[in-house]
Image: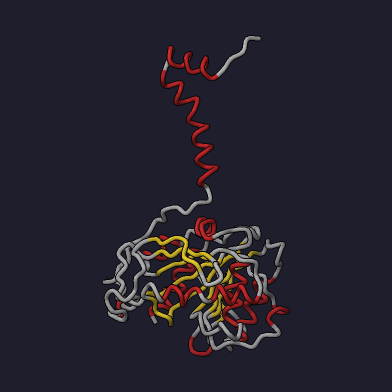
């Protein structure tokens, strides 16, 4: 069989049709692009906050931050880092006003995912920024008490660069990220940080919670799947613990969105349990409910 080299192929394409060159090489180019850039930070789709129609959400704290007192950029900022090197990305509304104290949503990543993959998984950026939130995605460290505390320092670091209302800090995340967001709400050195939490597929059940004291009344939205084989039943157990901590009525009601809610809690907080049917690794996709849950609290 005659030897055929790349030069022969190119000469053939040049003699017949230049379009064939594109058809031949385009799949190779696309494969190389995906290979080299799939884990890079991407430009996120940011929303426009409607400060006029949501005065209680943001502009009730208008002029809380003096002009030029916060150096954080408008839009997306990539590669910020905690003291111990946990990286995180910060996204503001497109029309972010640095004098308004914004509510903050912290998203903690599951094991095996970084901040970029966590953002792609959850898809919360556009809806959060459109609702007037600053939203931040943090990398996943190997979870321990020390690293969880380190994750809890990130909201304070963000406050130094962006105008954030420290009374409206909301935590969420999936799997290890859900565990971190829940743990930060009851650990003695960090329970003052969140104003509410929405953990998903967290690896904490009633046995893991028994040794911890209840924090003050805290709005909680627990998301867990009935098909979660890694942490089976953990969601209903942890939500029951939070309902007891919040001194809620023991019999929950069903909401129109399919979640159940324990009402009658101290200081008017609510404890939700939203049960899905996806595998453990899948984000529950309750983005509308999460944003509504946090927005209702931000307006109070």
Identify the residue at horizontal 57%, vertical 60% (top origin). 283
Quarter of the image containing the N terminus?
top right
**Whole-percent x, y for residue 291 in the image:** 45, 68
Quarter of the image containing the C terminus?
bottom left
Q: How many marks?
A: 0
**Whole-percent x, y for residue 66 in the image:** 28, 79
Q: In the displayed structure, would residue 286 be above or below residue 216?
A: above
Quarter of the figure with residue 144: bottom right
Quarter of the figure with residue 150: bottom right
Q: In the displayed structure, would residue 206 be above or below residue 199?
A: below
Q: Nearer the viewer, residue 243 or 47?
A: 47
**Whole-percent x, y for residue 167 in the image:** 43, 82
- Seen in the image, is 74 located left or right of residue 29? left
Identify the residue at horizontal 67%, vertical 76% (top origin). 237
Residue 275 seen anywhere in this rendered image of the structure:
no
Identify the residue at horizontal 68%, vertical 71% (top origin). 234
Residue 250 seen anywhere in this rendered image of the structure:
yes
Identify the residue at horizontal 39%, vertical 56% (top origin). 45
Q: Residue furthest top?
A: 1
Quarter of the figure with residue 281: bottom right
**Whole-percent x, y for residue 125 in the image:** 43, 61
Q: Nearer the viewer, residue 165 or 268?
A: 165
Q: How is the image coloured?
A: secondary structure
């Amino acid at each position: 069989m005659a030897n055929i080299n790349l030069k022969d192929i190119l000469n053939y394409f040049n003699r017949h049709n230049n379009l064939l060159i594109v058809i031949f090489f385009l799949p190779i180019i696309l494969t190389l692009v995906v290979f080299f850039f799939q884990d890079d930070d991407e430009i996120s789709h940011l929303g426009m906050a409607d400060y006029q129609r949501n005065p209680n959400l943001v502009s009730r704290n208008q002029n809380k931050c003096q002009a030029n007192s916060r150096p954080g950029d408008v839009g997306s900022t990539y590669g910020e880092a905690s003291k111990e090197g946990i990286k995180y990305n910060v996204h503001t509304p497109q029309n972010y006003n640095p004098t308004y104290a914004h509510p903050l949503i912290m998203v903690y990543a599951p094991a095996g995912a970084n901040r970029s993959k966590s953002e792609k998984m959850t898809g919360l950026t556009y809806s959060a920024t459109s609702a007037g939130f600053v939203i931040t995605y943090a990398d996943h460290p190997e979870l321990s008490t020390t690293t969880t505390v380190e994750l809890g320092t990130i909201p304070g670091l963000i406050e130094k660069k962006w105008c954030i209302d420290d009374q409206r800090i909301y935590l969420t995340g999936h799997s290890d990220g859900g565990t971190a967001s829940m743990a930060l709400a009851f650990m003695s050195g960090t329970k003052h940080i969140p104003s509410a939490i929405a953990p998903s597929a967290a690896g904490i059940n009633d046995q893991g919670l028994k040794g911890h004291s209840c924090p003050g009344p805290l709005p909680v939205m627990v998301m867990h799947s009935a098909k979660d084989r890694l942490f089976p039943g953990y969601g209903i157990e942890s939500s029951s613990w939070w309902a007891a901590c919040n001194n809620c009525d023991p019999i929950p009601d069903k909401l129109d969105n399919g979640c159940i809610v324990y009402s009658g809690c101290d200081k008017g907080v609510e404890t939700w349990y939203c049960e899905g049917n996806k595998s453990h690794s899948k984000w529950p996709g309750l983005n509308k409910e999460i944003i509504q849950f946090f927005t209702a609290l931000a307006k109070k």
